[in-house]
Every structure is written in structure tokens, then in C-alpha cells.
Image (cartoon, helix red, strand yellow):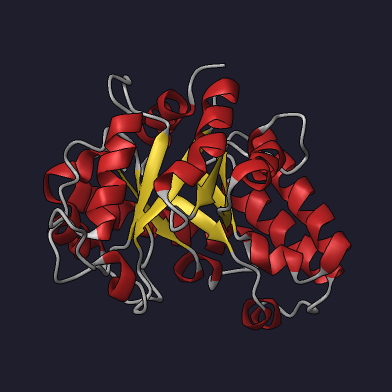
Amino acid sequence: MTSFGARLHEAMATRGALCVGIDPHPALLADWDLPDTPTGLASFARTVVEALADRVAVLKPQSAFFERHGSRGIAVLEDTIASARRAGALVIVDAKRGDIGSTAAAYADAYLDPASPLAGDAVTASPYLGFGSLRPLLSAAAAHDRGVFVLAATSNPEGPSVQQARTADGRTVAQLILDEVAAANEGAEPLGSVGVVVGATVRGVDHDLAKVNGPILAPGLGAQGGTPEDLRRVFGDALGVVLPAYAREVLQNGPGIDALREGADTVRRHCASVLGRPS
């Protein structure tokens, strides 16, 4: 298997730069006339996979919405990851894990070891126990040709109080994370396998993204207020490695298969016009 960074680079070139979240929160289940149960969850996830896994670069199931249904929900998540990957989409498991020592290593086994039914192509991770705490995840990703997306400057309004705080050398905390990721990706071609999460709604601080040499996952688009035009403002010269992420903007078009596909195609075209890439 080639590296995650190389697989993602190829997927974005052939399918367009788009990540669609699989976020089956209760309001969406109700909008789709589905029960808020493991059965409704399974129907929702199957429909999204059927509609999009053979045509978008990345699907991103949000683990929390599956976990809230207990063991049956986790079983649906396992099936969703496997079926999406079989259909050709890369899968980022949005679990935002982060811990230290043997616990971090256990998370790496769960989400990055191909022997685990929860393993996708990549996992999201929080570095806020110190970037070094992620070493077990980064090592497992390298060993298994998987990826890690590290939270840097997130789209939620509470994030800046921590992420835009200044370190002793004058860098923001977010920039410190970006620089650590750049070091982890040094020399990788065509794209490193350690990505960062930088929200499309981030304002007030300019981040040096040019040296990251890895994919930049850009949430905050659509329902959170970000627009494709914000991508140019936030990412500047790094637009070539940006992976726009949508969820509700696409999912609200369901449950019809054709409507979900059209919703994904629409946002992909809008982003492509800003990113300067084929749609």
C-alpha cells in the first residue's frame, strides 16, 4: 500500500477536493424520517455510503454520533468504515483522540492498525496534551500507511482562547502545532501523511501554512458559516493542499440518493472554482 498522503493526493486529483462528513445527529435522522436508534443510524449511514463513496475523495464519519448508541452504534461505525473503503472512498474517522503513553498507543491500535475493525485511512487527533503525546499515533500511521489529522486552529468559537495564545517564543499555539506537523512531514512526496485541521472560519491570526507539506482539512463550511470564498482568505498560498469538509450542507439533501449526489457535486464545484482545481 502507498502512503496515506500519496493516496489522498491521488483521490483529490481524480475525484476532486471534497470531504463529506457522516454526522447522523438526531435532527438529521428526524429530517430523514428515521428513528434515533441503531436501526435508523444504520439506514442513514448506508444511504450516505451508497450515494457518495464511489464519487467523493473522502468520507468522515463522526464517531460520537455512533458512540451515543452504544455497542450497536459502534458496530454500525465499523460497517460504515468498511463499506465506504470498499466503494473507493478514503475514510477519516473523526474521533479527535489524544492521550499519553500506553493509552495513546491503544488509540493508535484502534484507529490505525488494519487488524482493527475501527481502522480507517486516517484519524483526527488532539495535540493539546503536548504534540509529543501523539507520537504513538504518528508511528502507527507511518507503520501502516495511514494518516493523522492534528487539530491546529479549529472552527469552533471557543478555540482561539487556547489556539491563538502566544508561546514564549511569540508563536501562537496553533502555529507551534503547524510547525511540528511540518517537521513530521519533512521530505515526504507528493504529500505528507500528517495533516492539520484549520477551520475555514478562522479569523484574526495569519498562520504560516506553506511548510506543512501535508493535507489541510478545512471544516466550518456550510452550516457553520464558512463559504468557499473564505478558503482563499484563510489558506492563501496553501490552497493546493486544502481538503474542504462539509456535512449538513450535503446531508440535508437526503435521504434521496440523487439529491445527496447533487448536493455533494454542487459544493465540490463551488470549492473547485476557488481552489483552481478540476471539479
| Quarter of the N terminus within the rendering | top right
Which is nearer the eye, 215 or 32? 215
Find residue 166 and report its horizontal and vertical position in percent: 19, 64
Up the image or down, 271 lies above or below 251; here it is above
Confirm whether residue 56 shows in the render: no
Confirm whether residue 229 shows in the render: yes
Residue furthest front as drawn:
168
Q: Name the quadrant containing residue 145.
A: top right
Find residue 66 and report its horizontal and vertical position in percent: 73, 64
Up the image or down, 87 lies above or below 235; here it is above
Q: Answer with left or right where residue 269 lies relative to residue 29.
A: left
Q: Name the quadrant containing residue 104.
A: top right
Residue at position x 64%, y 56% from top? 48
Find residue 181 and report its horizontal and vertical position in percent: 33, 39
Residue at position x 38%, y 36% from top? 12
Q: Answer with left or right where residue 91 lies relative to residue 167.
A: right
Which is nearer the eye, 24 or 106? 106
Find residue 78 and report its horizontal and vertical position in percent: 77, 47
Q: Answer with left or right where residue 121 lies relative to residue 130.
A: right
Which is nearer the eye, 277 or 80? 80
Up the image or down, 146 lies above or below 149; here it is above
Q: Name the quadrant containing residue 203.
A: bottom left
What is the total number of numbered labels drawn onto the structure image?
Answer: 0
Residue at position x 83%, y 53% from top? 75
| Quarter of the C terminus within the rendering | top left
Residue at position x 63%, y 36% from top? 112
